[in-house]
Image: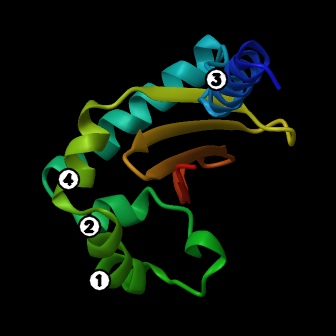
C-alpha cells in the first residue's frame, strides 16, 4: 500500500473509533415538565441526605431489594450505603449533571455519571427511587 492509502485508512479508522465513542456518550432526552419536577424534588432530598451522610434517609429513597439482591433495608443501610456512597461519590452526586432517558419499557430514568460508575434513578409508582449502578463503559 502507498503512504497515502495507509494514511487514509488510519484516518478512517480513527474517525470510526471516535464515532463509536460518541455513540456511547449519554444522550439528553427531553423529559416532560412533570418528570423534571418530580425528579428535581427527589434529587434535592437525596442530595440533602447524602450531604448529611444520612444512610437511613438514602435507604428510604432506594428500591429494595437493591440490584436483584436479597438486600433488606437494614443490610443496605449498614453494608451497601457505605460501600456505594463514599465521600467522593457523595460529592460527585452533589455537583454532576443529570441525564434523562426513557427506556424501551416506557419508564423514565435519570443517570448521574461519577467516574467509572453511573448512578441510576427510576420513576416508579412510588415516585423516583435510586435503583442501581452500572459501570461507565
Badge 2 is on which residue? 55
Provide the residue designation for mark 3: 27
Residue at numbered disc 4:
88
Per the rendering, the mark at residue 78 is 1
Q: Nearer the viewer, mark 2 or mark 3?
A: 3
Which of disc 3 and disc 2 is earlier in sequence? 3
Tell me, yes or no, whether the two marked residues, 4 and 2, touch with CB atoms within 8 Å.
no
Q: Residue at x 56, y 72 (%)?
A: 66
C-alpha gap between disc 3 and disc 1: 34 Å
Q: Which mark is residue 102?
A: none
Q: CA distance from mark 4 to mark 3?
A: 25 Å
Quarter of the image where the N terminus is located: top right
Q: Secondary structure at mark 3?
A: loop
Q: Secondary structure at mark 2?
A: helix
The number of callouts visible is 4
The residue sitting at 35% across, 67% down in the picture is 84
**C-alpha gap between disc 1 and disc 2:** 8 Å
In percent of width and height, residue 55 lies at 26, 67
CB atoms of marks 1 and 2 within 8 Å: yes
Amino acid at each position: 500500500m502507498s503512504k497515502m492509502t495507509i494514511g487514509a485508512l488510519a484516518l478512517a479508522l480513527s474517525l470510526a473509533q471516535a464515532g463509536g465513542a460518541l455513540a456511547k456518550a449519554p444522550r439528553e432526552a427531553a423529559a416532560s415538565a412533570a418528570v423534571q419536577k418530580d425528579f428535581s424534588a427527589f434529587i434535592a432530598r437525596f442530595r440533602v441526605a447524602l450531604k448529611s451522610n444520612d444512610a437511613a434517609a438514602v435507604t428510604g429513597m432506594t428500591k429494595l431489594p437493591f440490584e436483584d439482591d436479597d438486600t433488606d433495608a437494614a443490610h443496605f443501610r449498614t453494608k451497601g450505603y457505605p460501600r456505594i456512597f463514599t465521600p467522593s461519590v457523595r460529592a460527585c452526586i452533589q455537583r454532576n449533571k443529570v441525564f434523562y432517558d426513557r427506556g424501551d419499557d416506557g419508564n423514565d430514568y435519570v443517570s448521574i455519571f461519577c467516574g467509572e460508575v453511573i448512578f441510576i434513578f427510576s420513576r416508579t409508582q412510588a415516585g423516583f427511587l435510586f435503583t442501581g449502578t452500572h459501570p461507565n463503559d
